[in-house]
Structure formats: C-alpha cells, structure tokens
Image (cartoon, grey):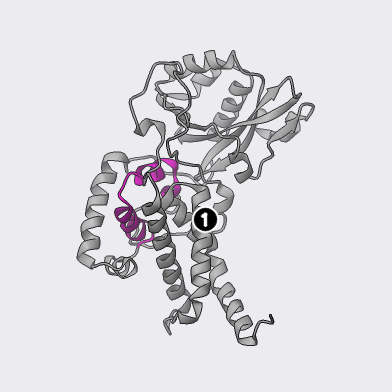
Amino acid sequence: MAIEPANIEENQAFERLAEPFRREIKLHCYRMLGSLHEAEDALQETWLRAWRSFSSFEAGSSDERGSFRAWLYRIATNACLNALESRKHQQRYLPDQLGPAGPPKMEGGPALDVPWLEPYPDANLEGFADAAPNPEARYTARESVHLAFVAAIQQLPPRQRAALMLCDVLGWASAEAASLLGSSTASINSALQRARESLSNRYSDRRPPLESQPTPAQQRLLGRYLQAWEGHDVNGFVAVLKEDATAVMPPWLQWFAGREVIGTFFAAAWKTCGGLHLVPTSANGQPAFAIYEFSGADKRWNAHSIHVLTLEDDAISAITLFLDPRLFQDFGLVQFLPGDADSELRNPLRHA
C-alpha cells in the first residue's frame, strides 16, 4: 500500500523532531528501570506510542521543540511506570544493598533470581551527558548516571522515582511534573520530599566531583590496576585501593569491604583462573574494563566480566564487577579474542 504524501510528510516531521532526543530518552528509561535492556524496550515503546499519536500532538507556538521533548518524556515516563507495575520486583539491586559485607570467600552459587542493576555503556551518552543541566536540577547529568546514584534511586517507589527524575535531574518545576504524571502539584511535592529523604539515606551528596575524563594521575592509576590484574599481582592491586574500598560482583550476593579483605579474596581467586586480559572501556560516566580470561582448551581469550571503577583522588574506592559475558555485546565488544593477538598494541594503558 502506497503511503499518502501527507503521511510521508508527517513521518518526516516526527523523525525530525524525535531523533535528537533518542539518547536522552533512553537514558531516562535506564535511570527509571535500572536495566539497559529494559530501557531499550521502553524506548521502542515510547517511539511507537509517540509515532501513533503524533497527529494529535499540538506543539506550543513559541517552543515546538521544547513542547515535543516534554511530550516524549511524558510518554516515556508512563511507559516505564507501566513496566515497573508489571514487574515482580520493582527494584534492581547491587549486592551491598542486600546484606553486610562478608569474609573473603564465596559460598553457594550466584543469585540468578535477583534483579541485578546493569551498567550503562558510555557510548550511549555521547552528545548530551556533559550538557549543562537546568539550573533547577539538584544533580548534574554526569552524576545522575553514576552507578551509585542509579543504584540508590532504584530503591525508591516508582512514582517517587519519577518525581525525583523529573524535578531533581531534569530540573522541571513541580507543576510541570504534576501535569506529566496526571497528578496534583501538592502530590508531586509530597512524593518529591519523601524521595529526597529516602535518597539521602542511601546516597551521600558529599562525594568528590566527577571528572569528565580521568586526570593524568588517575590514568596512571588505571594503568597500575590493569597491570596488577594481568600480572596477578596482589600487592600491586591492593596498593591502588582505598583503605575502605568495596568490591561487589553481581550475580553473587557476597561482597567485600576493606582492601586487605579484597586482596585476600582475589589472591585466592586468581589461583583458579587462567590469564587475564583487560580492555579499557567506560560505563555510567566512570572508567571501566572489559576482562577476558584465557582458555587453554579453546586457545583464546573468552569474555569474562565488566569492571566499573569509582575513583576518589588517587585511589579506587569501589569496584563493581558485572560477571555477565552477555554485556560485552552492549559495549560493542567481541565475545572472544584470538589467543595469539598482540595485546601490547591493543592497550596503551600498559605503558602508563
């Protein structure tokens, strides 16, 4: 069936208005849902709903682009709220949110039934993550994608989460958020107050400023981390950690606090694994590494885990190891590397 000219023009108008907002809407869905894959589903749902109802959209005469952006956020937020309502669990977690730190050993098996938080590749942040936020926003664009922040807001009830995202991250007025959520301004203010109180118990706002890129000293620190892991150098690994550093490894419930405990655990773990090869990447606005483990049977390096690091000054304060090789595809990385690949050429951090 041929498309009528009017429909062609309408489709082109939709794409012209919608495409510049694709990445920020996907990020909004990720913050709401804590899952890269669910965020992609919510984005597709948003685009389908918006496309189907585009003819009914009435742009403000003074700011068509701004009105359209708000309209997309309304659709996306409601799509996320519907997704959360249909979930068995409305929160996603990191291990340190589910119990105290333990001794340096693993017990039992991975908790595959827990809805774990997923990392967000920085490749999806290009073009808007460093933009100046609305002056009314309490959190910068970079901080609001930081792993600790996203983990904390997952523990808020869905509508409180939405109110906080709209007002404290996007900088919308309470009245605007109320209009979007089909609620009253008083109700939004109440939800926002409860959300802020709950968040303050889970996320400290006295964190060091987040740099858009590691400093030269931090770049050297990352090089030392890489060399310690690839060399199974426990002393070198412990030396780059803060005294009170933490290490979590979803889907395992066990997590570790304190660099000596972390060092003891990995000293034992490295004895049971093959060679390790680290490829620099970035996630949630933080430095990260993709880890490959050498398999003698396959004679190749197999995808193993994604490490997301939190840096404080000249040390690493937190390591989040996502032990899910399927994430490599999301980071644009292959599942395995040939065993004879020249790693020295691939990784400049070895010379840091």
Q: Nearer the viewer, residue 30 or 280?
A: 30
In this picture, residue 92 sits left or right of residue 5 = left
Name the image quarter holding the C terminus.
top right
Instruction: Report if residue 141 is visible in the image.
Output: yes
Q: Position of residue 217 (x, y in %)?
A: 54, 33
Q: Nearer the viewer, residue 42 or 280?
A: 42
Q: Is residue 48 above or below residue 54?
A: above
Q: Position of residue 104 (x, y in %)?
A: 43, 16
Q: Amino acid at mark 1?
A: Asp
Q: Is residue 302 above or below residue 86?
A: above
Q: Residue at x 42, y 55 (%)?
A: 83
Q: Position of residue 312 (x, y in %)?
A: 43, 34
Instruction: Report if residue 243 is visible in the image.
Output: no
In this picture, residue 138 sits left or right of residue 241 = left
Q: Is residue 138 above or below residue 280?
A: below
Magenta segment includes 163: yes
Q: Position of residue 80 (x, y in %)?
A: 41, 57
| Res 220 → quadrant | top right
Name the magenta segment's main secondary structure.
helix
Look at mark 1 in the image and give the residue it sits on. Answer: 41
Magenta segment includes 294: no
In this picture, residue 140 sits left or right of residue 19 = left
In this picture, residue 46 sits left or right of residue 280 = left
Magenta residues span 143-171
Q: Residue at x 40, y 67 (%)?
A: 74
Most extreme residue toward the front is 1
Please, what secondary structure does the residue beneath circle 1 have? helix
Most extreme residue toward the right is 340
Q: Nearer the viewer, residue 228 or 145?
A: 145
| Res 192 → quadrant | bottom left
Q: Residue at x 58, y 25 (%)?
A: 224
Q: Residue at x 48, y 31 (%)?
A: 251
